[in-house]
Image (spheres, rainbow, N blue to C red):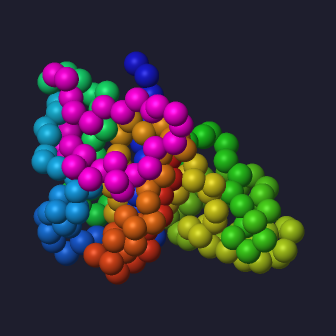
Amino acid sequence: MSQRHYLYLYCTDLDYFPVHREDFIRSCQDYGLLSKPYDSQGENLYLVGDHFLQHISFLGCSPYLKVYPENDQDSDFCSAVVPVSTTPVQFLSSQQKIRPRCPACKKSLPPIDTMLEDWRHHQSNKSVTCPTCNATSALYTLDWRKNAGFINFHIAISNIFPKEAIPGEALLNWLKSISESEWKYFYV
């Protein structure tokens, strides 16, 4: 079985969860990012909307993109998942070992595997001091190079290979306007 790839659009306010999730979904449908729900083997998915390709730019000469399932067993198409309820903050990564960059000087930090493991057990926002510039940054604010991130509320779009597609600035600004918080993205 092949690995499933995702583009995660996430709210940087890790305490944010919409008061009315259904209103958030309806707004995404009206904006054309999402379409109707699609129940597939117990997963509550959403098909991508009519304006999905206007909001997400695909790179390369001719990317193969399927936006509708061919049958009930098909899972090889773009769909989206939006969390049903708030959960503890999660750290997701596209790689086993990842070295983030310092947000101040942009230099790579030493491996922080031990700190991430400690965070997984205690769920606290640890601080990291950059050995290059001595800036102290919260673990949540490090530059993970679009290969990882800390998330709570998000939209996970399946079958998007890492760095194959980029959400438009207008989409990120629109998400910010309806949530009153900044949105970013990464790939897994």
Q: Is residue 65 magenta?
A: yes
Residue at 78% over, 58% down: 108
Residue 14 visible: no
Above/below status of 108 relative to 156 = below
Front-most of 132 and 77?
77
- Is residue 50 one of those drawn in magenta? yes
Where residue 146 appears, x then y in whole percent? Answer: 57, 53
Judging depth in this view, the residue of 77 and 63 nearest the camera is 63
Residue 157 lies left or right of residue 168; in this view the side is left
Q: Is residue 72 left or right of residue 53?
A: left
| 105, 96: nearer the viewer | 105
Whether 38 is drawn above or below 172: the answer is: above
Residue at x-position 17% and y-position 50%:
35
- Residue 112 found in image quarter: bottom right
Q: Residue at x 43, y 22 (%)?
A: 2
Can see residue 30? Answer: yes
Quarter holding the N terminus is: top left
Q: Which residues are magenta?
A: 43-71
Q: Is residue 16 left or right of residue 166?
A: left
Percent of width and height locating residue 11: 40, 67
Picture layout, residue 160 above or below residue 24: above
Q: Is residue 18 above or below residue 42?
A: below
Residue that sits furthest to the front in the current view: 61
Q: Residue 103, located in which quarter of the rendered image?
A: bottom right
Give the x, y percent position of residue 166.
48, 52
Percent position of residue 111, x then y: 75, 52
Q: Is 153 or 115 nearer to us in this picture? A: 153
Q: Which residue lies most toward the top here?
A: 1
Q: Quadrant of residue 9?
A: bottom left
Residue sitting at x 83%, y 76%: 134
